[in-house]
Image (cartoon, grey):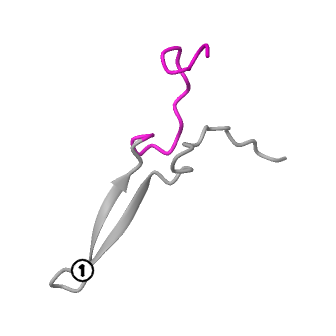
Amino acid sequence: MPQHARNTPVCRSCEGFATAAITTGTRHTDGTRVTLRVTCPTCKGTGTARPATASTVPAGR
């Protein structure tokens, strides 16, 4: 019997990949790379879209 997956809304900006590790190109003294962790500003690092509320839905023209 197949299992049904929940239909969770995915962020449109990051498509569910909310956090990215970006290398700066430089290395630490032990040889590891210097990386920056960057989170999606739209979903604040959750990867899911928030449901629209009355205050965020554009109305009219």
Secondary element type, mark 1: strand
Front residue of 1 and 39: 39
Q: Which residue is mark 1?
A: 26
Q: Give left or right: position of 44 versus 60.
A: left
Amino acid of disc 1: Thr
Q: Which SS does the magenta portion mostly show?
A: loop
Residue positioned 45% across, 51% down in the render: 18
Mark 1 packing: few (<14 Cα in 10 Å), some, or many (20+)? few
Q: Position of residue 6 (x, y in %)?
A: 67, 38
Which residues are the magenta region? 42-61
Q: Position of residue 22 (x, y in %)?
A: 36, 67
Residue positioned 44% across, 40% down in the render: 42
Q: How many marks?
A: 1
- Residue 20's quadrant in the figure? bottom left
Where does the C terminus fall, quadrant-wise? top right
Q: Is residue 31 above or below residue 14?
A: below
Taking the view exactly as shown, the residue that stands out farthest to the left is: 29
Taking the view exactly as shown, the residue that stands out farthest to the front is: 61
Instruction: Let me know if residue 54 is in the magenta part.
Output: yes
Q: Is residue 60 above or below residue 29?
A: above
Instruction: Let me know if residue 8 is in the magenta part.
Output: no
Q: Give left or right: position of 56 versus 30.
A: right
Front residue of 55 and 33: 55
- Residue 10's quadrant in the figure? top right
Residue positioned 55% across, 26% down in the render: 51
Q: Position of residue 46 (x, y in %)?
A: 45, 43
Q: Position of residue 48 (x, y in %)?
A: 52, 40
Front residue of 6 and 35: 35
Residue positioned 56% across, 50% down in the render: 15
